[in-house]
Amino acid sequence: MENPSGVEKLSARQKEILRLVAQNHQAKEIARLLDIGERTVKTHTEAARERLGVATSRDAARLLVAYEAQATPQTGVGRDDRGAARPIPDAADPAKLPLAAEGAGPSGDGARDMSHLRAVPDIGPPDGKYTRLQAYLRRLNPVQWIGLILVLALVSTLLVSGLLIAAVGMIEAIEHVVARLE
């Protein structure tokens, strides 16, 4: 199933797309992020799967990530798509990630600026209970975020209104009981 030499044969674009797949992005999101067509994303992932001899794009992404992690586990130096050594940024601290210049990727070879894909710090308990929620929230575009905020605001308003109505009803009931006792 695994063909490590196949990883060497992947194009820079295929590796870029597989890294985004490894970050749980869907084809439509990857297309938007890279400013290419969704069909182009699917073509690249299909070609990468064939080269790696795996059944799914998730398997291909896992294989690429594992291969890249194995290539330089202790040196603190990674490989860009040209094979040149470069420092690996500390993904746990987003402030330490380099900002790419306009039109220059992390390797400086003219690739797209991917600085907007910085690592999002984990929220919630460390046992990974909310990892699916985190992955979902990372994939939201700005319009979806606005919609989510509006829905949450509406639900919050309805809950507060309901509590206020219940409180007023309780006060009126108490006043009615007190009035009958007098």
Image (cartoon, rainbow, N blue to C red):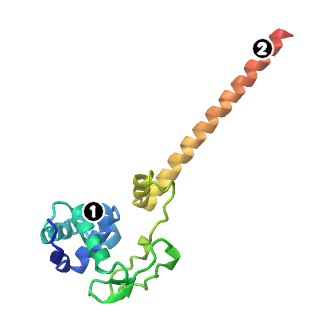
Q: Would you name the residue on which mark 1 appears? A: 27
- Is 39 positioned to the left or the right of 167 in the image? left
Which residue position holds label 2? 177
User: Which residue is drawn at the image coordinates 15% and 72% (left, top)?
Assistant: 3
N-terminal label among 2 and 1: 1
Q: Position of residue 104 (x, y in %)?
A: 37, 85
Disc 1 marks a residue whose amino acid type is: Ala
| Outermost residue toward the front in this view | 74
The residue closer to the viewer here, 102 or 98, is: 98
What is the crowding at mark 2: few (fewer than 14 residues within 10 Å), some, or many (at least 20)? Answer: few
Q: Is residue 159 left or right of residue 45?
A: right
Question: Which one is in front, 68 or 97?
Answer: 68
Provide the secondary structure element on which disc 1 rests: helix
Image quadrant occupied by the C terminus: top right
The x, y position of residue 49, in whole percent, is: 16, 67
Residue that appears at 75% across and 24% down: 171
SS category of the residue bearing label 2: helix
Find the residue positioned furthest to the right.
Answer: 182
| Amino acid type, residue under disc 2 in the picture | Val
Image mark count: 2
Which picture quadrant has residue 52? bottom left
Residue 1 horizontal/vertical position (percent):
14, 65
User: How far is the residue under mark 2 from the one under mark 1?
Assistant: 64 Å
Q: Are marks 2 and 1 in contact (CB under 8 Å)?
A: no
Q: Residue at x 52, y 52 (%)?
A: 149
Is residue 6 rendered to the left or right of residue 99?
left
Residue 20's x, y, as percent? Answer: 32, 68
134 sits left or right of 6 in the view: right
